[in-house]
Image: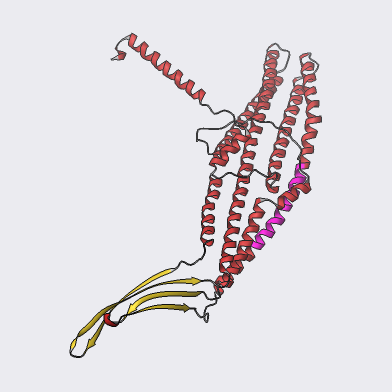
Amino acid sequence: MLFDTPAGERAWSRRLGILAGLVLATGSAFAAAPLTLDEAWRLAESANPTLRAARANLDAAEGQLRDSSGLLYNNPQLSTDQTRRRVPQAGQSDNRFHEQTVGISQTFEIAGQAGYRREAAVRELAAVTESIDEVRRQVRAEVEQRFYRVLILQRRIETEREALSAVNDAASAVKKRVAAGEDSRLDGNLAAVEAERGHNQLAVLDEQLLQARAELATALQLPATTLPETVGELRAMPMAATLETLQAAARERPLLRSLEHRELAARNRLGLERSAAYPDITVGLSTGREGPYDTREQFTRLTLSVPLPLFRRNGAGIGKAMTELTQAEIERQSTEREVTAQVNALWQRLSSLQGRVKRLGDSVLPALDENRRLSSTAYRAGEIGLLQLVLVNRQLLDARRDYLDALGDFIQTRIALEQTAGWPNLAPEKNK
């Protein structure tokens, strides 16, 4: 066997080493690159199950429109009749013969049902198309929110690591000074506790980042073992649109257009049910032969039948259609009011957050950065103690946390405002 000699063992070990190297190299080559927002959107629009389920409704609406667009809604009926007759005759054998009849009949709607049915199908198809656009916007907004949550947490971790590095340096310096008798054990314990708090905060953020990356992977339908990283800019860019522009855009949001089409479809279905109270006319045409073979007659028959609407006037269908129309009107009106109120509230919140981010970024952070440089110099010169240095570093770290939290809230609010207002308009979706 290969392992019987030391040389064989060495050869097998070399093979295992080469194989392990190839596996590691392959894993590095196929490691997922950090995602941009555009790439995340592209993945979501091609694989998100909610959007795919919404697109599946399109087939039913298109099929309904095809059925309602036919020349006649009712199919013609073809009939045939075969009759065998036996005529007894006195003193003679019975006279036997066959009679044949072939006919066709067609039911006609006379109260405009075809127009109501066709218009309702057109509106339903338009409503489904608009609802797909609405779901698409919702999916993109959800992906964007999860994308920036990962990006914010990545930036938070970078900030915490930078602060932890400074704390560790200070702790190392204090430890040496305690050993030399220049600082007290209290200072040494204070530095050690501050370092451990930094490690704990970093571990908490790592756990939050892991959860956020898993949620983003779920929205993008990535493999279970893939936890994406994100790249992009974090800036509190002011909205390019005014409140009036957003309110006007909200009135044209796909959700509201879909509800408007559904209301019109319900109105046409009510017209259809009311016209169904009028009877349909059935016209039939048949031809055949009757009588014995020696006296057989050929005939053509035209029939006309109309049901008498004496006992049932389609009250149930009309009542159900009226209920659906009323519900559609209420849903559209309440949604319009809700969207308008949400746009106003989110606009006010966004303005407040923009002011907070600006104050923190323009005034607080620069002053604290200067304080850290001055305090570090003063501490090395022995002009201040460790407590003052820790206080300055903690203030700077807390301010950076506040800034990133405010920036994250600003970005999430901006995304929610754009989604609620349906702004900006998306490019039309290509057929999937």
Place of residue 164 in the rendered image (x, y in percent of width and height, measured from the top left): 67, 23
Place of residue 75 in the rendered image (x, y in percent of width and height, measured from the top left): 46, 66
Q: Please identify the quadrant where the C terminus is shown.
A: top right
Question: What coloring was used for the rendering?
Answer: secondary structure
* Residue 198, quarter of the rendered image: top right
- Classified by dominant secondary structure, the portion drawn in magenta counts as helix
Q: Please identify the quadrant where the N terminus is shown.
A: top left
Q: Where are the magenta residues, as a range?
A: 328-350
**Is residue 349 a member of the stretch shown in magenta?**
yes
Instruction: Name the residue furthest top.
Output: 7
Place of residue 159 in the rendered image (x, y in percent of width and height, measured from the top left): 68, 27
Count of numbered badges drawn on the protein: 0
Closer to the camera, 120 or 345? 120
Residue 324 in view, yes or no: no
* Residue 155, quarter of the rendered image: top right
Residue 332 in view, yes or no: yes
Closer to the camera, 340 or 162? 340
- In the rendered view, tell whether residue 400 sits above or below residue 180: below
Closer to the camera, 356 or 319? 319
Q: Is residue 252 left or right of residue 278?
A: right
- In the rendered view, tell whether residue 167 sits above or below residue 48: above
Place of residue 108 in the rendered image (x, y in percent of width and height, measured from the top left): 51, 71
**Is residue 366 a member of the stretch shown in magenta?**
no
